[in-house]
Amino acid sequence: MDNVSVLLISPFETDRRAMASIFTRSRWSLAAVSGLGEAQQLLRRQTPSIIVTETTFPGGDWRLVLSTASVLQPVPPKVIVASRLADDALWQHVLDAGGYDLLEKPFEPESIFWTVSQAWRHWRAECARALQRLGPGYESREAPLPVEEPMVALAAS
């Protein structure tokens, strides 16, 4: 996967629209769903490199997303939790549970681009390490090695 692919799980239409608007300024791909059922359907077809999830949504919460993501691929997607009540305690809980980071809402383009870019770079580095462990000549659709940096073009303010 040379492209940054993100799954957003949020029951809030305003957040899904805001994220989609932010992503129109990049070559990144975004799939936005409102709850667990839609997320499970999507994850059966494809696995994103990044999952951004609301703290709670219909059918689950961020902890369920973390546990599900950990078994999706040899190199699981990075999970970022989004919350209006982003504080140090929640951030520490997310990190302790294995999440990548916490995003404060409402979504700001610069914050989204920075956080998703960093998460993707860490995910890509883990893919590279996984392929090194497997040895030369190994090819897998399950643990792709991305080759391009994400192309981000912020619209002029």
Image (cartoon, rainbow, N blue to C red):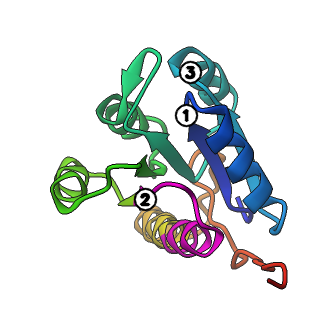
Which amino acid, mark 2? Glu
Res 67 → quadrant: top left
Question: Which residue corresponds to mark 3?
Answer: 40
Which amino acid, mark 3? Gln
Which amino acid, mark 1? Ser
Cα gap from disc 3 to disc 2, whole angstroms: 25 Å
| Label 1 vs 3, first from the N-terminus | 1
In the shown orientation, is residue 151 left or right of residue 81?
Answer: right
Badge 3: few (under 14), some or many (20 or more) residues near its Cα, within 10 Å? Answer: few
In the shown orientation, is residue 73 left or right of residue 22?
Answer: left
| Label 3 vs 2, first from the N-terminus | 3
Q: Nearer the viewer, mark 2 or mark 1?
A: 2
Cα gap from disc 2 to disc 1, whole angstroms: 14 Å
Vertical side of 87 occupied by 150: above or below: below
Asked which secondary structure carries label 1, the reply is: loop
User: Which of these two is toward me, 42 or 81?
Assistant: 81
Indicate the position of residue 10 as horizontal and vertical percent values. Answer: 55, 34
In the shown orientation, is residue 122 left or right of residue 157?
Answer: left
Residue at horizontal 54%, vertical 68%?
124
In the shown orientation, is residue 125 left or right of residue 117?
Answer: left
Image quadrant holding the C terminus, namely bottom right
Asked which secondary structure carries label 3, the reply is: helix
User: Which of these two is toward me, 128 or 69?
Assistant: 69
Question: Which residue corresponds to mark 1?
Answer: 10
User: Which of these two is toward me, 86 or 33?
Assistant: 86
Question: Which residue corresponds to mark 2?
Answer: 104
Q: Main secondary structure of the magenta part?
A: helix
Question: Number of callouts in the render?
Answer: 3
